[in-house]
């Protein structure tokens, strides 16, 4: 119980720790730390039944190895997991246990440990290996949250009512075993008394008679009524013995003494052999446990080295993976930059394409307008040519029809030449109208000499 007191002294003052300790022992664990430890034994049987219900395969394997469940759960329950699991987990378990006000958390935590480490226990092939492995695994339960969560949520069926039902079922068998053990203890004490008496009788034969008288006196004090009856019967027996032959009794006395001495010597020898066997068995058991611990130590050391090698390999793989991730990150950054550049170029190209489309549209409109102007001018040219031809035909008809003197013949050609030049100038002007309109946009002041001559001829006319 010093571990309980030490844990409480770490958390509170001395007086508070004392009264808390008293409350835990008297209220929460009543009957656990008595001389017979009845409630502790009952809880061990209850836990074994729960184990057989929840983990039958594991219990069968432990039975095959010769490991009793109480060997494992007994220290857990008696110490309330102090020094069995890490301190952080112990305090978490104590919190729940004190909060609920009963021992349900003991069973749930033990079942949770069995659930966590049961698969590893099934692989063991020796009782010592199984117990050592479970102790080492339980001592490494540093994840208190997982332990408490598994205990509280994974075993909700383990309630106080269920535990009380199982306790009522198993308590009579425990009481029967304790009663039988107490009877055997009394028989052993009586046998030890007989051996002592025989040893004393070897050195002092009269001491046996005196001791018998003392025992008779003690029995008389213990049970007065029975002693009175025994005294009456003993008085009658004494009278009968007095009537017997004293010589025959004296002759048989040495034989009885020798037999008693031989029996005493044999009894002492058997007791010594038994004591030596017990000590030898304890020594062999201790040596066996040391060998098992050493084997387990070597196995654990090899396992630790293997795990360290695997951890180194994993760390190297992790480093390579990180380097690959860094390289991939650089590649992704470059790709992103190239994508940005490509996107900017695409946007610029789209902008240039839109500008070119706009310019093409404007040029197309200008081209359409110029084409329409040319078509209209061609129509005018055709009309002018037709008018000119008509005029020429008319003039030729006039020249043929008219008969005039010589002087008149001289004047008509000049008039004819004037009309002809006017028609030709008008036709040329209409054909070059499109070119003159474009040239006038750049230099509006330039006027062709042919046009000026046509204008002067028209003014002269």
Image (cartoon, grey):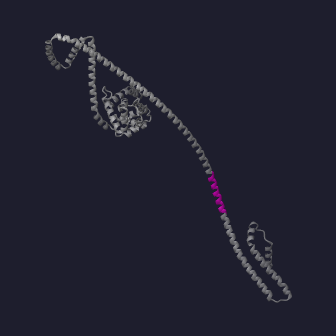
- Which is nearer the eye, 164 or 127? 127
Residue at the spot 66% in from the left edge and 67% down from the top edge: 365
Q: Quadrant of the C terminus?
A: bottom right
| Residue 345 drawn above or below residue 266 | below
Q: Quadrant of the N terminus?
A: top left
Residue 407 location in percent, x, y? 86, 87
Does residue 341 appear left or right of residue 53 in this picture?
right
Residue 236 location in percent, x, y? 13, 16
Residue at the spot 17% in from the left edge and 11% down from the top edge: 248
Residue at the spot 46% in from the left edge and 29% down from the top edge: 297
Residue 379 location in percent, x, y? 70, 76
- Residue 348 within the segment the image draws in magenta: yes
- Which is nearer the eye, 401 or 185? 185
- Residue 367 within the segment the image draws in magenta: no
The image quarter in which residue 409 lies: bottom right
- Residue 55 seen in render: no
The image quarter in which residue 399 lies: bottom right
Residue at the spot 58% in from the left edge and 43% down from the top edge: 326
| Residue 361 drawn above or below residue 48 | below
Which SS does the magenta portion mostly show? helix
Does residue 328 appear left or right of residue 90 in this picture?
right
Does residue 214 appear left or right of residue 278 in this picture?
left
Tell me how many marks there are: 0
Residue 313 location in percent, x, y? 53, 37
Please give the range of residues in magenta. Answer: 341-359
| Residue 451 drawn above or below residue 22 | below
């Amino acid at each position: 119980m010093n571990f309980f007191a030490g844990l409480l002294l770490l958390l509170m003052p001395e007086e508070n720790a004392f009264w808390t300790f008293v409350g835990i022992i008297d209220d929460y664990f009543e009957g656990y730390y008595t001389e017979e430890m009845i409630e502790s034994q009952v809880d061990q049987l209850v836990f074994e039944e729960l184990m057989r219900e929840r983990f039958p395969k594991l219990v069968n394997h432990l039975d095959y190895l010769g490991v009793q469940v109480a060997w494992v759960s007994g220290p857990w329950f008696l110490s309330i997991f102090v020094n069995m699991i890490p301190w952080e987990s112990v305090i978490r378990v104590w919190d729940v246990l004190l909060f609920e006000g009963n021992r349900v958390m003991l069973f749930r935590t033990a079942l949770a440990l069995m659930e966590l480490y049961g698969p590893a226990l099934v692989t063991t092939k020796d009782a010592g290996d199984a117990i050592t492995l479970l102790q080492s695994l339980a001592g490494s339960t540093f994840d208190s949250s997982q332990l408490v969560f598994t205990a509280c949520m994974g075993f909700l069926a383990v309630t106080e009512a269920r535990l009380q039902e199982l306790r009522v079922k198993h308590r009579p068998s425990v009481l029967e075993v304790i009663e039988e053990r107490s009877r055997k203890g009394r028989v052993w004490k009586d046998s030890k008394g007989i051996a002592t008496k025989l040893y004393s009788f070897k050195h002092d034969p009269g001491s046996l008679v005196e001791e018998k008288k003392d025992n008779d006196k003690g029995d008389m004090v213990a049970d007065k009524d029975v002693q009175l009856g025994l005294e009456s019967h003993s008085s009658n027996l004494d009278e009968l013995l007095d009537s017997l032959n004293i010589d025959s009794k004296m002759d048989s006395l040495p034989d009885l003494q020798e037999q008693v001495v031989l029996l005493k010597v044999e009894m002492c020898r058997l007791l010594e052999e038994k004591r030596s066997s017990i000590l030898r068995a304890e020594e062999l058991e201790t040596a066996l446990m040391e060998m098992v611990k050493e084997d387990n130590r070597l196995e654990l050391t090899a396992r630790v080295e293997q795990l360290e090698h695997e951890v180194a390999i994993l760390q190297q793989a992790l480093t390579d993976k990180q380097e690959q991730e860094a390289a991939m990150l650089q590649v992704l950054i470059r790709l992103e930059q190239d994508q940005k550049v490509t996107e900017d170029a695409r946007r610029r190209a789209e902008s240039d394409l839109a500008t070119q489309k706009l310019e093409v549209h404007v040029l197309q409109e200008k081209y359409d307008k110029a084409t329409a102007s040319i078509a209209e001018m061609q129509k005018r040219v055709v009309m002018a040519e037709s008018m000119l031809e008509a005029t020429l035909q008319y003039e030729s008809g006039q020249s043929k029809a008219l008969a005039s003197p010589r002087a008149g013949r001289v004047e008509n050609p000049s008039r004819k030449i004037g009309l002809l030049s006017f028609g030709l100038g008008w036709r040329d002007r209409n054909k070059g109208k499109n070119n003159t309109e474009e040239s006038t946009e750049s230099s509006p002041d330039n006027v062709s000499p042919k046009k000026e001559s046509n204008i002067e001829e028209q003014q002269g006319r």
